[in-house]
Image: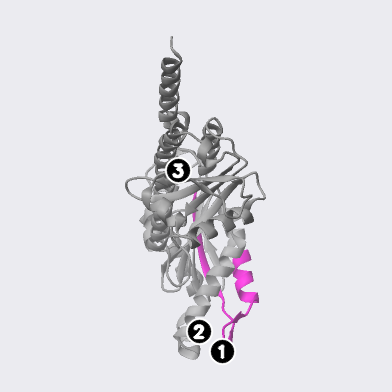
Amino acid sequence: MSEKRIALLELIEKIERLGQFQDRIDFPSSIKQIWNAFLADVRNLVEIEICALFLVDANTSEFALKYTEPEGMAKLCRKEIDLQIECGIFSWIINRRQPALIPGMAFDKEKSVVMLPLSTVKRTLGVVLILTPIQESFITHEKMKLLTILTKECSLVMENTMLYARLRKKHLSLERANREIKLLSRTDSLTGCYNRGYLNEVLPREITRAQRYKRPLSIAMCDIDHFKKVNDKYGHQSGDEVLKKFVQRILELIRHDTDWLARYGGEEFLLVLPETNLDNAVNLAERLRTHLAQNIIETEAHQISITASFGVTGIYAAIPDISIRPEDLITTVDSYLYMAKSRGRNQIVSGPHLN
Protein backbone atom coordinates (compact mmCIF):
# COMPACT_ATOMS: atom_id res chain seq x y z
CA MET A 1 0.00 0.00 0.00
CA SER A 2 1.39 3.37 -0.99
CA GLU A 3 2.30 6.03 1.54
CA LYS A 4 -0.30 8.40 0.05
CA ARG A 5 -3.03 5.79 0.45
CA ILE A 6 -1.98 5.11 4.05
CA ALA A 7 -1.96 8.83 4.80
CA LEU A 8 -5.40 9.20 3.23
CA LEU A 9 -6.82 6.34 5.28
CA GLU A 10 -5.31 7.82 8.43
CA LEU A 11 -6.87 11.19 7.60
CA ILE A 12 -10.27 9.59 7.04
CA GLU A 13 -9.97 7.77 10.36
CA LYS A 14 -9.14 11.01 12.14
CA ILE A 15 -12.07 12.80 10.50
CA GLU A 16 -14.43 10.00 11.51
CA ARG A 17 -13.15 10.07 15.09
CA LEU A 18 -13.52 13.85 15.38
CA GLY A 19 -16.98 13.61 13.83
CA GLN A 20 -17.95 11.29 16.67
CA PHE A 21 -17.08 13.88 19.34
CA GLN A 22 -20.73 14.17 20.39
CA ASP A 23 -20.93 10.42 20.95
CA ARG A 24 -18.11 10.57 23.48
CA ILE A 25 -19.92 13.12 25.68
CA ASP A 26 -22.57 11.91 28.08
CA PHE A 27 -25.72 14.04 27.97
CA PRO A 28 -26.57 16.03 29.96
CA SER A 29 -22.99 17.07 30.52
CA SER A 30 -21.17 20.12 31.87
CA ILE A 31 -19.03 22.72 30.13
CA LYS A 32 -16.05 21.42 32.13
CA GLN A 33 -16.52 17.86 30.85
CA ILE A 34 -16.86 19.07 27.25
CA TRP A 35 -13.77 21.24 27.66
CA ASN A 36 -11.67 18.33 28.97
CA ALA A 37 -12.77 16.06 26.10
CA PHE A 38 -12.06 18.82 23.57
CA LEU A 39 -8.57 19.40 25.00
CA ALA A 40 -7.75 15.71 24.74
CA ASP A 41 -8.60 15.72 21.03
CA VAL A 42 -6.76 18.98 20.34
CA ARG A 43 -3.59 17.59 21.94
CA ASN A 44 -3.64 14.81 19.36
CA LEU A 45 -3.49 17.44 16.61
CA VAL A 46 -1.18 20.21 17.83
CA GLU A 47 1.27 20.77 20.64
CA ILE A 48 -0.28 22.88 23.40
CA GLU A 49 1.63 25.04 25.84
CA ILE A 50 -1.29 27.17 27.04
CA CYS A 51 -4.96 26.83 26.24
CA ALA A 52 -7.90 29.00 27.32
CA LEU A 53 -11.67 28.89 26.88
CA PHE A 54 -13.60 32.16 26.55
CA LEU A 55 -17.41 32.03 26.53
CA VAL A 56 -19.84 34.77 25.57
CA ASP A 57 -21.56 36.16 28.66
CA ALA A 58 -25.33 36.06 28.12
CA ASN A 59 -25.83 39.33 30.00
CA THR A 60 -22.97 41.47 28.69
CA SER A 61 -22.24 39.71 25.35
CA GLU A 62 -18.54 39.97 26.23
CA PHE A 63 -16.03 37.12 26.01
CA ALA A 64 -15.44 35.97 29.59
CA LEU A 65 -12.58 33.66 30.51
CA LYS A 66 -13.90 30.30 31.74
CA TYR A 67 -10.90 27.94 31.97
CA THR A 68 -7.15 27.98 31.37
CA GLU A 69 -4.77 25.07 30.99
CA PRO A 70 -2.52 25.15 32.89
CA GLU A 71 -4.24 27.15 35.63
CA GLY A 72 -2.74 30.47 36.61
CA MET A 73 -2.45 31.83 33.06
CA ALA A 74 -5.65 33.87 33.13
CA LYS A 75 -4.00 37.31 33.12
CA LEU A 76 -1.78 36.54 30.14
CA CYS A 77 -4.64 34.97 28.15
CA ARG A 78 -6.89 37.96 28.75
CA LYS A 79 -4.10 40.28 27.63
CA GLU A 80 -3.66 38.32 24.41
CA ILE A 81 -7.38 38.55 23.62
CA ASP A 82 -7.42 42.29 24.41
CA LEU A 83 -4.49 42.90 22.07
CA GLN A 84 -6.08 40.84 19.29
CA ILE A 85 -9.31 42.83 19.74
CA GLU A 86 -7.43 46.16 19.55
CA CYS A 87 -5.73 45.28 16.27
CA GLY A 88 -8.94 43.95 14.72
CA ILE A 89 -7.80 40.35 14.26
CA PHE A 90 -10.17 38.96 16.87
CA SER A 91 -13.36 40.29 15.23
CA TRP A 92 -12.12 39.10 11.83
CA ILE A 93 -11.70 35.55 13.15
CA ILE A 94 -15.09 35.57 14.96
CA ASN A 95 -16.90 36.83 11.87
CA ARG A 96 -15.25 34.21 9.62
CA ARG A 97 -16.15 31.46 12.10
CA GLN A 98 -13.05 29.57 11.00
CA PRO A 99 -9.91 28.61 12.99
CA ALA A 100 -6.89 30.80 12.36
CA LEU A 101 -3.15 30.55 13.07
CA ILE A 102 -1.77 33.97 13.95
CA PRO A 103 1.33 35.45 15.61
CA GLY A 104 1.05 35.83 19.37
CA MET A 105 1.09 39.38 20.76
CA ALA A 106 1.26 38.92 24.52
CA PHE A 107 3.29 35.72 24.41
CA ASP A 108 6.78 34.83 23.25
CA LYS A 109 7.25 36.06 19.67
CA GLU A 110 8.65 32.66 18.71
CA LYS A 111 5.28 31.07 19.47
CA SER A 112 2.04 31.04 17.48
CA VAL A 113 -1.57 31.37 18.57
CA VAL A 114 -4.38 29.22 17.23
CA MET A 115 -7.82 30.82 17.60
CA LEU A 116 -10.79 28.47 17.36
CA PRO A 117 -14.20 30.22 17.24
CA LEU A 118 -16.94 28.19 18.92
CA SER A 119 -20.03 28.94 16.87
CA THR A 120 -23.14 27.38 15.38
CA VAL A 121 -25.57 28.53 12.71
CA LYS A 122 -27.53 30.35 15.41
CA ARG A 123 -24.85 32.14 17.40
CA THR A 124 -21.28 32.53 18.61
CA LEU A 125 -20.64 30.71 21.87
CA GLY A 126 -17.03 31.65 22.54
CA VAL A 127 -13.48 31.12 21.40
CA VAL A 128 -10.58 28.84 22.26
CA LEU A 129 -7.08 30.32 22.42
CA ILE A 130 -4.12 27.93 22.02
CA LEU A 131 -0.45 28.86 22.40
CA THR A 132 1.73 26.48 20.43
CA PRO A 133 5.46 26.41 19.61
CA ILE A 134 4.59 25.49 15.99
CA GLN A 135 5.44 28.22 13.50
CA GLU A 136 2.89 29.20 10.88
CA SER A 137 4.80 27.52 8.06
CA PHE A 138 4.92 24.20 9.91
CA ILE A 139 1.24 23.64 10.67
CA THR A 140 -0.47 21.87 7.81
CA HIS A 141 -3.69 22.65 6.04
CA GLU A 142 -4.79 19.13 7.05
CA LYS A 143 -4.46 19.89 10.75
CA MET A 144 -6.35 23.17 10.42
CA LYS A 145 -9.13 21.28 8.63
CA LEU A 146 -9.25 18.72 11.43
CA LEU A 147 -9.36 21.52 14.01
CA THR A 148 -12.28 23.03 12.09
CA ILE A 149 -14.22 19.75 12.24
CA LEU A 150 -13.48 19.28 15.93
CA THR A 151 -14.42 22.86 16.79
CA LYS A 152 -17.76 22.60 14.99
CA GLU A 153 -18.57 19.33 16.74
CA CYS A 154 -17.62 20.82 20.12
CA SER A 155 -19.75 23.91 19.39
CA LEU A 156 -22.85 21.79 18.76
CA VAL A 157 -22.38 19.82 21.98
CA MET A 158 -21.72 22.97 23.97
CA GLU A 159 -24.78 24.74 22.54
CA ASN A 160 -27.01 21.79 23.44
CA THR A 161 -25.56 21.74 26.95
CA MET A 162 -26.12 25.47 27.41
CA LEU A 163 -29.66 25.19 26.06
CA TYR A 164 -30.39 22.30 28.42
CA ALA A 165 -28.99 24.29 31.37
CA ARG A 166 -31.13 27.32 30.46
CA LEU A 167 -34.27 25.22 30.04
CA ARG A 168 -33.61 23.41 33.31
CA LYS A 169 -33.06 26.69 35.11
CA LYS A 170 -36.22 28.10 33.56
CA HIS A 171 -38.12 24.95 34.52
CA LEU A 172 -36.86 25.11 38.09
CA SER A 173 -37.73 28.80 38.24
CA LEU A 174 -41.20 28.01 36.92
CA GLU A 175 -41.62 25.22 39.45
CA ARG A 176 -40.52 27.58 42.22
CA ALA A 177 -42.92 30.25 41.01
CA ASN A 178 -45.75 27.73 40.85
CA ARG A 179 -44.99 26.59 44.39
CA GLU A 180 -45.00 30.18 45.57
CA ILE A 181 -48.27 30.88 43.77
CA LYS A 182 -49.81 27.75 45.26
CA LEU A 183 -48.57 28.74 48.71
CA LEU A 184 -50.00 32.24 48.31
CA SER A 185 -53.34 30.77 47.25
CA ARG A 186 -53.36 28.72 50.45
CA THR A 187 -52.08 31.44 52.76
CA ASP A 188 -53.87 34.22 54.60
CA SER A 189 -52.42 37.44 53.22
CA LEU A 190 -52.44 39.27 56.56
CA THR A 191 -51.23 36.73 59.12
CA GLY A 192 -49.24 34.32 56.96
CA CYS A 193 -50.94 31.21 58.34
CA TYR A 194 -53.11 28.98 56.15
CA ASN A 195 -56.46 30.24 54.92
CA ARG A 196 -59.97 28.79 54.72
CA GLY A 197 -59.28 27.27 51.32
CA TYR A 198 -56.36 25.25 52.67
CA LEU A 199 -58.47 24.19 55.63
CA ASN A 200 -61.23 22.92 53.35
CA GLU A 201 -58.68 21.03 51.24
CA VAL A 202 -56.49 19.43 53.89
CA LEU A 203 -58.70 18.80 56.93
CA PRO A 204 -60.69 16.04 55.14
CA ARG A 205 -57.40 14.27 54.38
CA GLU A 206 -56.30 14.56 58.01
CA ILE A 207 -59.59 13.01 59.15
CA THR A 208 -59.37 10.20 56.59
CA ARG A 209 -55.79 9.43 57.60
CA ALA A 210 -56.63 9.40 61.32
CA GLN A 211 -59.51 6.99 60.78
CA ARG A 212 -57.68 4.75 58.34
CA TYR A 213 -54.67 4.23 60.58
CA LYS A 214 -56.56 4.44 63.87
CA ARG A 215 -54.58 7.48 65.00
CA PRO A 216 -55.80 10.36 67.21
CA LEU A 217 -56.59 13.76 65.74
CA SER A 218 -57.56 16.88 67.67
CA ILE A 219 -58.59 20.35 66.62
CA ALA A 220 -58.81 23.56 68.61
CA MET A 221 -60.72 26.67 67.63
CA CYS A 222 -59.46 29.86 69.24
CA ASP A 223 -60.86 33.36 69.26
CA ILE A 224 -59.29 36.62 70.45
CA ASP A 225 -61.44 37.96 73.28
CA HIS A 226 -63.15 41.31 72.67
CA PHE A 227 -61.21 41.89 69.47
CA LYS A 228 -63.74 44.48 68.30
CA LYS A 229 -62.76 46.63 71.27
CA VAL A 230 -59.11 46.43 70.16
CA ASN A 231 -60.06 47.79 66.74
CA ASP A 232 -62.30 50.48 68.23
CA LYS A 233 -59.75 51.64 70.79
CA TYR A 234 -56.46 51.36 68.85
CA GLY A 235 -57.56 51.38 65.21
CA HIS A 236 -57.70 48.70 62.55
CA GLN A 237 -54.01 49.00 61.71
CA SER A 238 -53.10 48.10 65.29
CA GLY A 239 -55.77 45.39 65.15
CA ASP A 240 -54.02 43.88 62.12
CA GLU A 241 -50.72 43.91 64.03
CA VAL A 242 -52.42 42.12 66.92
CA LEU A 243 -53.67 39.40 64.57
CA LYS A 244 -50.20 38.90 63.09
CA LYS A 245 -48.53 38.73 66.53
CA PHE A 246 -51.29 36.42 67.76
CA VAL A 247 -50.49 33.95 64.94
CA GLN A 248 -46.74 34.24 65.54
CA ARG A 249 -47.15 33.34 69.20
CA ILE A 250 -49.26 30.31 68.44
CA LEU A 251 -46.75 29.12 65.84
CA GLU A 252 -43.97 29.45 68.43
CA LEU A 253 -45.50 26.68 70.56
CA ILE A 254 -46.79 24.13 68.05
CA ARG A 255 -44.95 21.40 66.17
CA HIS A 256 -43.95 22.76 62.77
CA ASP A 257 -43.67 19.33 61.15
CA THR A 258 -47.22 18.14 61.95
CA ASP A 259 -49.46 20.81 63.48
CA TRP A 260 -50.89 23.62 61.39
CA LEU A 261 -52.98 26.73 61.86
CA ALA A 262 -55.63 28.22 59.57
CA ARG A 263 -57.54 31.47 59.80
CA TYR A 264 -61.18 30.45 59.95
CA GLY A 265 -62.57 33.97 59.74
CA GLY A 266 -62.03 37.36 61.37
CA GLU A 267 -60.26 36.74 64.67
CA GLU A 268 -61.08 33.00 64.75
CA PHE A 269 -58.41 30.42 64.00
CA LEU A 270 -58.48 26.64 63.74
CA LEU A 271 -55.51 24.65 65.02
CA VAL A 272 -55.22 21.11 63.61
CA LEU A 273 -53.20 18.66 65.71
CA PRO A 274 -52.52 15.27 64.07
CA GLU A 275 -51.27 12.45 66.29
CA THR A 276 -52.60 14.30 69.36
CA ASN A 277 -55.26 12.97 71.73
CA LEU A 278 -57.77 15.24 73.48
CA ASP A 279 -55.89 15.47 76.79
CA ASN A 280 -52.66 16.56 75.11
CA ALA A 281 -54.57 18.98 72.91
CA VAL A 282 -56.14 20.59 75.99
CA ASN A 283 -52.70 20.86 77.62
CA LEU A 284 -51.35 22.61 74.51
CA ALA A 285 -54.34 24.94 74.40
CA GLU A 286 -53.68 25.87 78.03
CA ARG A 287 -50.05 26.67 77.26
CA LEU A 288 -51.18 28.82 74.37
CA ARG A 289 -53.83 30.59 76.44
CA THR A 290 -51.31 31.37 79.20
CA HIS A 291 -48.64 32.45 76.72
CA LEU A 292 -51.04 34.88 75.03
CA ALA A 293 -52.34 36.32 78.29
CA GLN A 294 -48.93 36.87 79.84
CA ASN A 295 -47.21 38.59 76.91
CA ILE A 296 -48.06 42.12 75.86
CA ILE A 297 -48.27 42.76 72.12
CA GLU A 298 -46.26 45.77 71.05
CA THR A 299 -47.24 47.68 67.93
CA GLU A 300 -45.62 50.84 66.61
CA ALA A 301 -47.96 53.02 68.66
CA HIS A 302 -49.35 50.88 71.46
CA GLN A 303 -48.83 48.11 73.96
CA ILE A 304 -51.87 45.83 73.86
CA SER A 305 -52.84 43.00 76.17
CA ILE A 306 -55.09 40.27 74.83
CA THR A 307 -56.59 36.97 75.95
CA ALA A 308 -58.12 34.15 73.92
CA SER A 309 -60.77 31.51 74.37
CA PHE A 310 -60.46 27.93 73.11
CA GLY A 311 -62.74 25.09 72.15
CA VAL A 312 -61.08 21.70 71.77
CA THR A 313 -62.30 18.35 70.45
CA GLY A 314 -60.87 15.28 68.79
CA ILE A 315 -61.39 11.84 67.32
CA TYR A 316 -59.79 8.64 68.56
CA ALA A 317 -58.63 5.26 67.36
CA ALA A 318 -61.39 3.65 69.42
CA ILE A 319 -64.27 5.50 67.77
CA PRO A 320 -66.66 3.48 65.59
CA ASP A 321 -65.70 3.21 61.95
CA ILE A 322 -68.14 5.83 60.74
CA SER A 323 -67.68 8.68 58.34
CA ILE A 324 -66.78 11.97 60.02
CA ARG A 325 -67.39 15.09 57.98
CA PRO A 326 -65.06 18.07 58.48
CA GLU A 327 -68.01 20.43 58.89
CA ASP A 328 -69.40 18.27 61.72
CA LEU A 329 -66.05 18.30 63.52
CA ILE A 330 -65.85 22.08 63.14
CA THR A 331 -69.43 22.49 64.39
CA THR A 332 -68.51 20.51 67.50
CA VAL A 333 -65.39 22.52 68.29
CA ASP A 334 -67.22 25.76 67.56
CA SER A 335 -69.87 24.85 70.14
CA TYR A 336 -67.14 24.31 72.76
CA LEU A 337 -65.61 27.68 71.87
CA TYR A 338 -69.03 29.32 72.28
CA MET A 339 -69.29 27.77 75.76
CA ALA A 340 -65.85 29.15 76.69
CA LYS A 341 -66.87 32.64 75.62
CA SER A 342 -70.25 32.48 77.32
CA ARG A 343 -68.60 31.42 80.60
CA GLY A 344 -66.42 34.54 80.74
CA ARG A 345 -63.74 34.06 78.05
CA ASN A 346 -59.98 33.47 78.52
CA GLN A 347 -60.59 29.80 79.16
CA ILE A 348 -60.85 26.39 77.48
CA VAL A 349 -63.83 24.12 77.01
CA SER A 350 -63.23 20.68 75.56
CA GLY A 351 -65.08 17.49 74.89
CA PRO A 352 -65.52 14.57 72.49
CA HIS A 353 -66.72 14.93 68.96
CA LEU A 354 -70.52 14.99 68.93
CA ASN A 355 -71.67 12.63 66.19
Q: Position of residue 80 (x, y in %)?
A: 57, 55
Q: Inspect this view and state whether residue 200 appears.
A: yes
Mark found first going from the N terminus, 1 or 3: 3
Quadrant containing the N terminus in the rendered view: top left
Picture quadrant of residue 174: bottom left
Mark found first going from the N terminus, 3 or 2: 3
Q: CA distance from mark 3 to mark 2?
A: 40 Å
Taking the magenta stretch, the answer to whether it contains residue 298 is yes
Q: Are marks 1 and 3 in contact (CB under 8 Å)?
A: no
Picture quadrant of residue 75: bottom right
Which residue is at 47% across, 79% downward?
A: 240
The image's mark for residue 301 is 1
Q: 333 and 301: which one is in front?
A: 301
The image's mark for residue 209 is 3
The image's mark for residue 238 is 2
Please state the extent of the stretch shown in magenta in the rendering.
Answer: 286-315
